[in-house]
Image: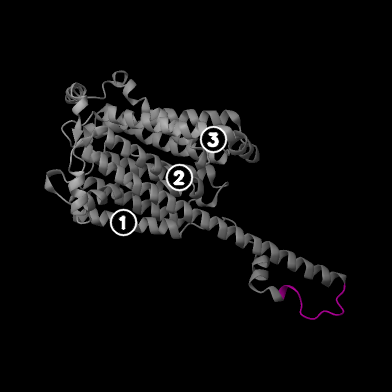
């Protein structure tokens, strides 16, 4: 492995971890709420800049890409591509009528518009998932996106999935189940006496105490207070567990949408008139940033005090940390995209799959070290550690099995 590949791998891994950690910090600072769309805005701004720096980074596009770009530019008015049923293949869940419709030539910009919509919805769902479940659980669950991409390619476009890939899917699924069932509410159990009071409230206050003195009354009162505290702690645990469960569901939804988007872009990249990958990513980033900017201008800015200032004040947020976090997300998105294309061009999805597995493990370890005191789901436990191992092994096996859908031309998030 040459030095350029090593450097690209390190950049891809480090920026992937930094993006997720910075996002989590913004959540704890009170400014990472999913409904503001500030995090997606800065992420897409970074992605939109990809096309501006290829020459400074040693040339992102190959000669073939440059030739394709010239041809696409010359025939822009008639630029068409085929989205579905390439080569006559139809997946087992693809209705013939839909396959026929998708097999008709459509504008590349129509495909890009659909990709932007899927990417926006997937990012928003993942944003909500990270806010609720925490960065560690989020990253482990989100590692399943490579599986969903292949499943959609199989279901809708007839791509094959090998036996090794099915084994990998089983491992990843087992890891996701463990991750979901092993996510509790709080890291601290209530005191034993409070737990006893919750389990047997009648034992906390004697049924008959007509001659109770002051000490007995105080003891009884203390038992009631402990029972109330135990009940409150149990309710908090249940609410926290429900929030983590909802976060896992949102993250899975985002992964499904990303998988569908990657399958769509794989079809686009297979077309003769497909734009270069860097230009495609920049176009998606630009259109997505413009769409999010409309939301920010129409919804977030008019409610800035309610959505940003008040939550930040309640969280004790630091303005310098907030600004640094948003800038870091934009810069990391740019560097992450550039590294992704270099690795994909030179080594395919195998190296990227290994790095995704390392990213899931690294985010969980970093999150446990930094955020365990803020949210229990960030703490590393035996079940969660096992989930990380299973998902990581599954992703590596899946990527090394020569997935035919590994050419998704947009950065794995």
SS of the residue at dot 3?
A: helix
SS of the residue at dot 1?
A: helix
Q: Mark 2, residues whose alpha carbon is within 10 Å: few (<14), some, or many (≥20)? A: some
Q: Camera-side residue: 262 or 207? A: 262
The residue singled out by tag 2 in the image is 365
The residue singled out by tag 3 in the image is 300
Is 293 left, or right, of 100 in this rendering? right
The first of marks 2 and 1 along the sequence is 1
What is the quadrant of the N terminus in the image?
Answer: top left
The first of marks 2 and 3 along the sequence is 3
The residue singled out by tag 1 in the image is 171
What is the quadrant of the C terminus in the image?
Answer: top left
Residue 191 seen anywhere in this rendered image of the structure: no
Is 312 left, or right, of 7 in this rendering? right
For the residues marked 2 and 3, what is the alpha-carbon distance in whole angstroms?
Answer: 33 Å
Q: Camera-side residue: 294 or 151? A: 294
Q: Residue at x 58, y 28 (%)?
A: 320
Q: Residue at x 27, y 32 (%)?
A: 109
The first of marks 1 and 3 along the sequence is 1
For the residues marked 1 and 3, what is the alpha-carbon distance in whole angstroms?
Answer: 41 Å
Which region of the structure is painted magenta?
A: 203-213
């Amino acid at each position: 492995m040459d030095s350029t590949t090593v450097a690209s791998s390190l950049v891809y891994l480090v920026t992937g971890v930094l993006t997720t950690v910075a996002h989590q910090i913004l959540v704890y600072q009170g400014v990472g709420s999913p409904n503001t769309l500030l995090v997606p805005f800065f992420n897409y701004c970074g992605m939109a800049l990809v096309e501006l720096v290829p020459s400074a980074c040693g040339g992102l596009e190959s000669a073939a890409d440059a030739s394709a770009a010239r041809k696409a530019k010359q025939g822009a008015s008639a630029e068409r591509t085929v989205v579905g049923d390439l080569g006559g293949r139809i997946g087992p869940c693809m209705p013939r009528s839909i396959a026929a419709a998708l097999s008709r030539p459509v504008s590349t910009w129509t495909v890009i518009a659909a990709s932007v919509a899927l990417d926006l919805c997937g990012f928003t769902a993942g944003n909500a998932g990270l806010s609720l479940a925490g960065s560690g659980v989020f990253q482990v669950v989100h590692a399943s996106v490579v599986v969903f991409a292949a499943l959609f390619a199989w279901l809708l476009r007839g791509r094959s999935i090998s036996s090794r890939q099915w084994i990998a899917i089983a491992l990843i699924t087992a890891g996701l189940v463990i991750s979901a069932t092993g996510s509790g509410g709080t890291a601290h159990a209530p005191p034993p006496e409070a737990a006893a009071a919750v389990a047997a409230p009648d034992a906390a206050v004697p049924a008959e105490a007509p001659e109770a003195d002051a000490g007995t009354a105080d003891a009884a009162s203390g038992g009631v207070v402990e029972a109330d505290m135990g009940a409150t702690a149990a309710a908090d645990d249940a609410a926290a567990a429900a929030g983590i469960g909802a976060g896992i569901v949102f993250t899975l939804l985002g992964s499904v949408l990303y998988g569908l988007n990657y399958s769509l872009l794989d079809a686009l990249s297979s077309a003769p008139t497909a734009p270069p990958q860097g230009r495609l990513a920049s176009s998606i980033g630009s259109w997505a940033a413009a769409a999010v900017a409309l939301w920010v201008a129409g919804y977030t800015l008019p409610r800035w005090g309610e959505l940003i200032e008040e939550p930040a004040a309640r969280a004790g947020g630091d303005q310098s940390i907030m600004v640094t976090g948003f800038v870091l997300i934009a810069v990391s998105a740019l560097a992450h995209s550039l590294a992704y294309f270099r690795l994909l061009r030179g080594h395919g999805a195998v190296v990227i799959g290994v790095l995704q597995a390392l990213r899931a493990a690294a985010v969980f370890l970093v999150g446990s070290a930094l955020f365990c005191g803020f949210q229990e789901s960030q703490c590393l436990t035996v079940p969660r550690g096992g989930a990380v191992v299973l998902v990581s092994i599954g992703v590596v096996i899946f990527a090394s099995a020569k997935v035919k859908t590994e050419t998704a031309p947009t950065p794995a998030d």
